[in-house]
């Protein structure tokens, strides 16, 4: 969610009237919602509230996955599954800002256009030879997987020796299994990513926030909003996600926030 701070407790880093983005466990489909300070960040004037509502979970997850967990560095390469989704487009934008080459894997030509807009170096349809595209460059340093399912074996084959399989989610609904001999024989890392881990570790959370904020101020990060729907169409928004038809983010707009 994103909006203005309406109230903040004594000692909070925020004050009434601050523009913020936040995540909450109890829901944000409301004109007024609450969130802990640990999952609230100041929102740059570069982003409007619709973009701000698209920022925190996806971009902080992608930055945590790529930089802190995946240890990706400038000049390395990454293959991204589900590259036209919320985390996928976030990962592509962050990669472009950090100098990381990307192969975006998407399911349709329409989603290919979204991945290119997000800054993908190369786009391959999921039904095409994305493994070959990775192997053609000697393998990628990392695979960021938001989809799961039966892609995991070819994802591991797409890695160069010492590569990292970064597991972010299972949008396909199927949780794959990994044969550990493949990890052992090619010195691969399998890395799990669960962003809420950072919320109870202030130093980690601060590093993620500062890294994302820097890329926002540089103009690298600009959330791609596919649909902005009114609250009465919340079911339609949920269906777009369930059927994997979302291109970037789907946002519910309630009433235009007014500064207190």
Image (cartoon, rainbow, N blue to C red):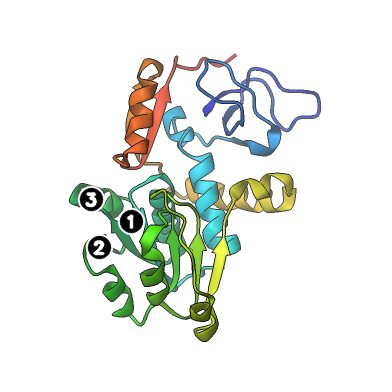
Q: Residue furthest right?
A: 11
Name the front one of labels 2 and 3. 2
- Callout 3: helix, strand or loop? helix
Left or right of 38? Residue 159 is left
**Seen in the image, is 143 located left or right of residue 11?**
left
Residue 233: name its quadrant.
top left
Q: Report x, y in % for residue 214.
A: 54, 50
Q: Which residue is mark 3?
A: 113
Kindly tell me whether residue 95 is visible in this rendering.
yes
Front-most of residues 102 and 20: 102
Query: Which residue lies at the image location 44% right of the left edge and 73% below the top edge?
Result: 76
The residue depicted at 36 percent of the width and 64 percent of the height is 151
**3D distance between C-alphas at marks 2 and 3:** 11 Å
- The picture quadrant where one finds residue 37 is top right
| Location of the C terminus (image quadrant) | top right
Disc 2 or 1, which lies upstream in sequence?
A: 1
Residue bearing mark 2: 124
Note whether 243 is above or below 214 in the view shown: above
Disc 1 target residue: 119
Mark 3 or mark 1, which is nearer the start of the sequence?
Answer: 3
Separation (CA) of disc 2 from disc 1: 14 Å
Give whichever of 195, 60 is nearer the camera: 195
Relative to 76, residue 223 above or below? above
Answer above or below: position of 158 versus 11: below
Looking at the rendered image, the disc whose residue lies closer to the viewer, 1 or 3, is: 3
Which label number is shown at residue 179?
A: none
- Residue 207 x, y percent position in the rendering: 65, 53
Q: Quadrant of residue 70?
A: bottom right
């Amino acid at each position: 969610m994103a909006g203005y701070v309406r109230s903040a407790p004594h000692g909070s880093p925020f004050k009434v009237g601050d523009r913020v983005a936040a995540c909450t466990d109890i829901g944000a489909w409301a004109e007024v919602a609450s969130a802990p300070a640990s999952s609230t960040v100041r929102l740059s004037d570069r982003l409007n509230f619709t973009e701000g509502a698209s920022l925190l979970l996806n971009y902080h997850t992608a930055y945590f996955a790529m930089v802190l967990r995946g240890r990706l560095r400038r000049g390395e390469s990454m293959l991204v599954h589900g590259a036209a989704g919320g985390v996928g487009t976030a990962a592509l934008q962050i990669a472009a800002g950090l100098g990381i080459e990307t192969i975006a894997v998407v399911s349709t030509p329409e989603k290919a256009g979204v991945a290119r807009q997000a800054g993908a170096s190369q786009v391959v349809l999921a039904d095409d030879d994305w493994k070959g595209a990775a192997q053609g460059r000697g393998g990628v340093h990392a695979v960021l997987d938001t989809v799961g399912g039966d892609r995991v074996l070819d994802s591991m084959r797409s890695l160069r020796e010492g590569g990292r399989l970064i597991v972010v989610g299972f949008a396909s609904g199927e949780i794959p299994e990994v044969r550990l001999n493949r990890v052992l024989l090619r010195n691969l890392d399998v890395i799990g990513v669960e962003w809420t881990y950072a919320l109870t570790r202030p130093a980690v959370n601060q590093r993620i926030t500062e890294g994302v904020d820097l890329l926002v101020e540089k103009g690298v990060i600009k959330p791609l909003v596919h649909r902005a729907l009114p609250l009465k169409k919340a079911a339609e928004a949920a269906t777009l996600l369930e059927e994997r038809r979302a291109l970037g983010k789907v946002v519910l707009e309630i009433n235009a926030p007014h500064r207190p």
